[in-house]
Image: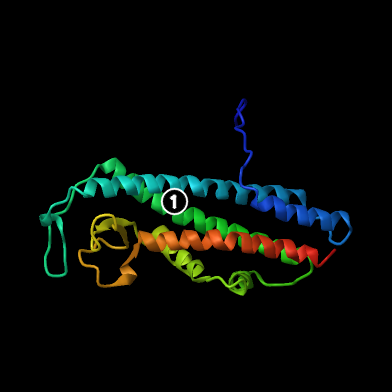
Amino acid sequence: MPKKWIHINTEVGDPWILHIWNAVNDAESLGNASLIPKKVKSQLGLSISTRLDMLPRIVHRINEEVNQVYKITKAHKEEHIFTKQREGYVFDIDEKLKYNLLIDIDSLLFELNSVCELMASLFFVLYTHIGKNIKKKEVGIIIKQVIEGAGKSSDWFSELDNQRNFFMHEGAPYFAVDVSEGPGKYDLLFMRENIKIFHDHSKFIKLSEINAIVKGFAIAKPIIQKHLIELYATKS
Protein backbone atom coordinates (compact mmCIF):
# COMPACT_ATOMS: atom_id res chain seq x y z
CA MET A 1 0.00 0.00 0.00
CA PRO A 2 1.19 3.60 -0.54
CA LYS A 3 3.32 5.03 2.27
CA LYS A 4 3.56 8.62 1.02
CA TRP A 5 1.42 10.60 -1.41
CA ILE A 6 0.35 14.05 -2.56
CA HIS A 7 -3.34 14.94 -2.66
CA ILE A 8 -4.34 17.20 -5.55
CA ASN A 9 -6.74 20.04 -4.74
CA THR A 10 -10.28 18.84 -5.46
CA GLU A 11 -12.08 22.18 -5.19
CA VAL A 12 -14.70 22.40 -7.92
CA GLY A 13 -15.99 25.44 -9.76
CA ASP A 14 -19.52 24.54 -10.80
CA PRO A 15 -21.91 25.70 -8.02
CA TRP A 16 -24.96 23.71 -9.22
CA ILE A 17 -25.06 21.33 -6.25
CA LEU A 18 -24.28 23.99 -3.64
CA HIS A 19 -27.64 25.77 -3.98
CA ILE A 20 -29.41 22.44 -3.53
CA TRP A 21 -27.40 21.55 -0.43
CA ASN A 22 -28.20 24.99 1.01
CA ALA A 23 -31.91 24.20 0.74
CA VAL A 24 -31.34 20.78 2.31
CA ASN A 25 -29.26 22.23 5.15
CA ASP A 26 -31.89 24.89 5.90
CA ALA A 27 -34.61 22.22 6.12
CA GLU A 28 -32.43 20.08 8.37
CA SER A 29 -31.52 22.98 10.69
CA LEU A 30 -35.20 23.89 11.06
CA GLY A 31 -36.03 20.31 11.95
CA ASN A 32 -38.16 19.90 8.84
CA ALA A 33 -36.08 16.99 7.57
CA SER A 34 -33.80 14.35 9.01
CA LEU A 35 -30.07 14.54 8.42
CA ILE A 36 -28.68 13.15 5.18
CA PRO A 37 -25.47 11.25 6.02
CA LYS A 38 -22.41 13.47 5.45
CA LYS A 39 -20.82 10.75 3.34
CA VAL A 40 -23.77 10.86 0.92
CA LYS A 41 -23.57 14.64 0.65
CA SER A 42 -19.81 14.81 0.21
CA GLN A 43 -19.41 11.86 -2.15
CA LEU A 44 -22.46 12.38 -4.37
CA GLY A 45 -22.04 16.14 -4.41
CA LEU A 46 -18.35 15.98 -5.28
CA SER A 47 -18.98 13.41 -8.01
CA ILE A 48 -21.64 15.58 -9.67
CA SER A 49 -19.59 18.76 -9.36
CA THR A 50 -16.43 17.12 -10.71
CA ARG A 51 -18.20 15.80 -13.80
CA LEU A 52 -19.91 19.15 -14.36
CA ASP A 53 -16.46 20.74 -14.31
CA MET A 54 -15.13 18.15 -16.78
CA LEU A 55 -17.85 18.68 -19.38
CA PRO A 56 -17.00 22.22 -20.57
CA ARG A 57 -13.36 21.23 -20.95
CA ILE A 58 -14.31 18.30 -23.17
CA VAL A 59 -16.60 20.55 -25.23
CA HIS A 60 -13.79 23.09 -25.61
CA ARG A 61 -11.41 20.41 -26.90
CA ILE A 62 -14.01 19.11 -29.35
CA ASN A 63 -14.69 22.61 -30.69
CA GLU A 64 -10.98 23.16 -31.32
CA GLU A 65 -10.59 19.77 -33.00
CA VAL A 66 -13.69 20.23 -35.16
CA ASN A 67 -12.44 23.63 -36.32
CA GLN A 68 -9.12 22.04 -37.30
CA VAL A 69 -10.91 19.29 -39.24
CA TYR A 70 -13.04 21.85 -41.09
CA LYS A 71 -9.99 23.98 -41.87
CA ILE A 72 -8.01 21.02 -43.21
CA THR A 73 -10.82 19.53 -45.28
CA LYS A 74 -11.46 22.83 -47.05
CA ALA A 75 -8.52 21.75 -49.22
CA HIS A 76 -10.52 18.79 -50.57
CA LYS A 77 -10.92 18.30 -54.30
CA GLU A 78 -13.88 17.09 -56.32
CA GLU A 79 -12.36 13.60 -56.38
CA HIS A 80 -12.81 13.39 -52.59
CA ILE A 81 -16.58 13.87 -52.74
CA PHE A 82 -18.77 10.82 -52.13
CA THR A 83 -22.43 10.77 -53.25
CA LYS A 84 -25.11 8.09 -53.50
CA GLN A 85 -24.13 7.70 -57.15
CA ARG A 86 -20.37 7.98 -56.90
CA GLU A 87 -17.61 6.70 -54.64
CA GLY A 88 -14.79 9.19 -54.10
CA TYR A 89 -11.30 8.96 -52.63
CA VAL A 90 -10.81 9.11 -48.86
CA PHE A 91 -9.25 12.29 -47.46
CA ASP A 92 -6.25 11.92 -45.13
CA ILE A 93 -5.92 14.00 -41.97
CA ASP A 94 -3.47 13.88 -39.08
CA GLU A 95 -3.92 10.65 -37.08
CA LYS A 96 -3.53 12.43 -33.75
CA LEU A 97 -6.27 14.92 -34.61
CA LYS A 98 -8.57 12.16 -35.87
CA TYR A 99 -8.27 9.95 -32.80
CA ASN A 100 -8.29 12.83 -30.32
CA LEU A 101 -11.63 13.91 -31.76
CA LEU A 102 -13.06 10.39 -31.60
CA ILE A 103 -11.83 9.97 -28.02
CA ASP A 104 -13.35 13.29 -26.99
CA ILE A 105 -16.72 12.56 -28.62
CA ASP A 106 -16.76 9.19 -26.86
CA SER A 107 -15.80 10.94 -23.62
CA LEU A 108 -18.48 13.63 -24.03
CA LEU A 109 -21.26 11.07 -24.42
CA PHE A 110 -19.96 9.05 -21.47
CA GLU A 111 -19.47 11.99 -19.10
CA LEU A 112 -22.78 13.61 -20.01
CA ASN A 113 -24.62 10.35 -19.45
CA SER A 114 -22.72 9.76 -16.20
CA VAL A 115 -23.63 13.14 -14.73
CA CYS A 116 -27.27 12.56 -15.70
CA GLU A 117 -27.20 9.25 -13.83
CA LEU A 118 -25.64 10.94 -10.80
CA MET A 119 -28.32 13.63 -10.89
CA ALA A 120 -30.93 10.87 -11.03
CA SER A 121 -29.34 9.34 -7.92
CA LEU A 122 -29.54 12.74 -6.23
CA PHE A 123 -33.18 12.99 -7.28
CA PHE A 124 -33.94 9.66 -5.60
CA VAL A 125 -32.03 10.54 -2.42
CA LEU A 126 -33.80 13.89 -2.00
CA TYR A 127 -37.27 12.59 -2.83
CA THR A 128 -36.77 9.86 -0.24
CA HIS A 129 -35.38 12.41 2.22
CA ILE A 130 -38.55 14.52 2.18
CA GLY A 131 -40.84 11.51 2.33
CA LYS A 132 -41.83 11.22 -1.32
CA ASN A 133 -41.59 7.49 -1.85
CA ILE A 134 -40.67 6.66 -5.43
CA LYS A 135 -39.02 3.70 -7.10
CA LYS A 136 -35.60 4.13 -8.70
CA LYS A 137 -36.98 3.06 -12.09
CA GLU A 138 -39.46 5.98 -11.90
CA VAL A 139 -36.79 8.67 -11.51
CA GLY A 140 -36.07 9.07 -15.23
CA ILE A 141 -39.79 9.48 -15.95
CA ILE A 142 -40.16 12.11 -13.22
CA ILE A 143 -37.12 14.06 -14.46
CA LYS A 144 -38.58 14.12 -17.99
CA GLN A 145 -41.89 15.34 -16.57
CA VAL A 146 -40.10 18.11 -14.67
CA ILE A 147 -38.28 19.25 -17.81
CA GLU A 148 -41.40 19.11 -19.97
CA GLY A 149 -43.40 20.84 -17.21
CA ALA A 150 -41.05 23.80 -17.66
CA GLY A 151 -41.96 23.87 -21.36
CA LYS A 152 -38.70 22.32 -22.59
CA SER A 153 -38.07 19.18 -24.59
CA SER A 154 -36.70 16.06 -22.90
CA ASP A 155 -36.07 14.20 -26.19
CA TRP A 156 -32.32 14.69 -25.80
CA PHE A 157 -32.44 12.56 -22.63
CA SER A 158 -33.35 9.34 -24.47
CA GLU A 159 -31.08 10.14 -27.43
CA LEU A 160 -28.09 10.60 -25.12
CA ASP A 161 -28.80 7.27 -23.44
CA ASN A 162 -29.13 5.55 -26.81
CA GLN A 163 -25.89 6.95 -28.27
CA ARG A 164 -23.85 6.44 -25.11
CA ASN A 165 -25.00 2.84 -24.70
CA PHE A 166 -24.13 1.97 -28.29
CA PHE A 167 -20.65 3.48 -28.30
CA MET A 168 -19.90 2.13 -24.82
CA HIS A 169 -21.08 -1.44 -25.36
CA GLU A 170 -21.58 -2.20 -29.03
CA GLY A 171 -19.26 -0.29 -31.34
CA ALA A 172 -16.68 2.43 -31.96
CA PRO A 173 -17.22 5.81 -33.64
CA TYR A 174 -15.95 6.76 -37.09
CA PHE A 175 -16.52 10.09 -38.77
CA ALA A 176 -16.97 11.79 -42.11
CA VAL A 177 -17.39 15.46 -43.06
CA ASP A 178 -20.77 16.51 -44.46
CA VAL A 179 -20.09 19.15 -47.13
CA SER A 180 -23.62 19.10 -48.58
CA GLU A 181 -24.30 22.75 -47.74
CA GLY A 182 -20.93 24.08 -48.87
CA PRO A 183 -18.07 25.97 -47.11
CA GLY A 184 -18.94 27.49 -43.76
CA LYS A 185 -21.81 25.04 -43.26
CA TYR A 186 -19.93 21.80 -42.73
CA ASP A 187 -21.16 19.19 -40.26
CA LEU A 188 -19.59 15.99 -38.97
CA LEU A 189 -21.20 12.57 -39.28
CA PHE A 190 -20.28 10.15 -36.49
CA MET A 191 -20.94 6.64 -37.71
CA ARG A 192 -21.86 3.50 -35.79
CA GLU A 193 -20.46 1.45 -38.67
CA ASN A 194 -17.82 2.21 -41.29
CA ILE A 195 -20.51 2.96 -43.87
CA LYS A 196 -19.98 4.61 -47.27
CA ILE A 197 -23.54 5.81 -47.96
CA PHE A 198 -25.75 7.76 -45.57
CA HIS A 199 -29.29 6.54 -46.17
CA ASP A 200 -30.06 5.04 -42.74
CA HIS A 201 -30.06 7.62 -39.93
CA SER A 202 -29.98 4.90 -37.27
CA LYS A 203 -26.35 4.23 -38.28
CA PHE A 204 -24.97 7.71 -37.62
CA ILE A 205 -25.45 10.89 -35.62
CA LYS A 206 -24.55 14.40 -36.75
CA LEU A 207 -22.35 16.69 -34.70
CA SER A 208 -25.20 19.21 -34.81
CA GLU A 209 -27.40 16.56 -33.15
CA ILE A 210 -24.80 15.95 -30.45
CA ASN A 211 -24.71 19.72 -29.94
CA ALA A 212 -28.50 19.62 -29.49
CA ILE A 213 -28.07 16.99 -26.75
CA VAL A 214 -25.50 19.21 -24.97
CA LYS A 215 -27.81 22.23 -25.33
CA GLY A 216 -30.76 20.20 -24.02
CA PHE A 217 -28.76 19.25 -20.94
CA ALA A 218 -27.66 22.86 -20.40
CA ILE A 219 -31.30 24.00 -20.52
CA ALA A 220 -32.46 21.19 -18.21
CA LYS A 221 -29.71 21.72 -15.63
CA PRO A 222 -31.21 24.83 -13.91
CA ILE A 223 -34.74 23.39 -14.25
CA ILE A 224 -33.73 20.28 -12.30
CA GLN A 225 -31.86 22.40 -9.75
CA LYS A 226 -34.89 24.67 -9.22
CA HIS A 227 -37.19 21.67 -8.83
CA LEU A 228 -35.00 20.05 -6.18
CA ILE A 229 -34.64 23.32 -4.24
CA GLU A 230 -38.40 23.85 -4.32
CA LEU A 231 -38.96 20.41 -2.81
CA TYR A 232 -37.54 21.88 0.39
CA ALA A 233 -39.38 25.18 0.11
CA THR A 234 -42.58 23.19 0.69
CA LYS A 235 -41.09 21.74 3.89
CA SER A 236 -40.28 25.08 5.55
Considering every residue shown, the one lying at the far top of the view is: 4
Q: Amino acid at mark 1?
A: Ser
Q: How far across and down, in percent of the image, does residue 102 sit?
A: 35, 50
> In terms of depth relative to the viewer, which is nearer, 156 or 168?
156
Residue 176 pos. (x, y %):
26, 57
Q: Residue at x 45, y 53 (%)?
A: 108
Can residue 36 be seen here? The reply is: no
Q: Residue furthest right?
A: 31
- Counting every numbered tag in the picture gives 1
Q: Is residue 124 left or right of residue 87?
A: right
Mark 1 surroundings: few (<14), some (14-19) or many (≥20) residues within 10 A: some
- Image quarter hosting the C terminus: bottom right
| Residue hosting label 1 | 107
Between 122 and 225, the one nearer to me in the picture: 225
**203 left or right of 111 in image:** left
What residue is drawn where x is 21% and y is 67%?
197
Describe the element under mark 1 as helix, strand or loop. Answer: helix
Q: Position of residue 125 (x, y in %)?
A: 71, 61
Q: Quadrant of the N terminus?
A: top right
Instruction: Give residue 203's position: percent from left, percent from top.
Output: 31, 68
Residue at 60%, 29% in the rendered image: 2
Direction from residue 56 to residue 40 in the image, left or right: right
- Eyeballing the image, is 37 above or below 127? above
Q: Is residue 48 above or below residue 201?
A: above
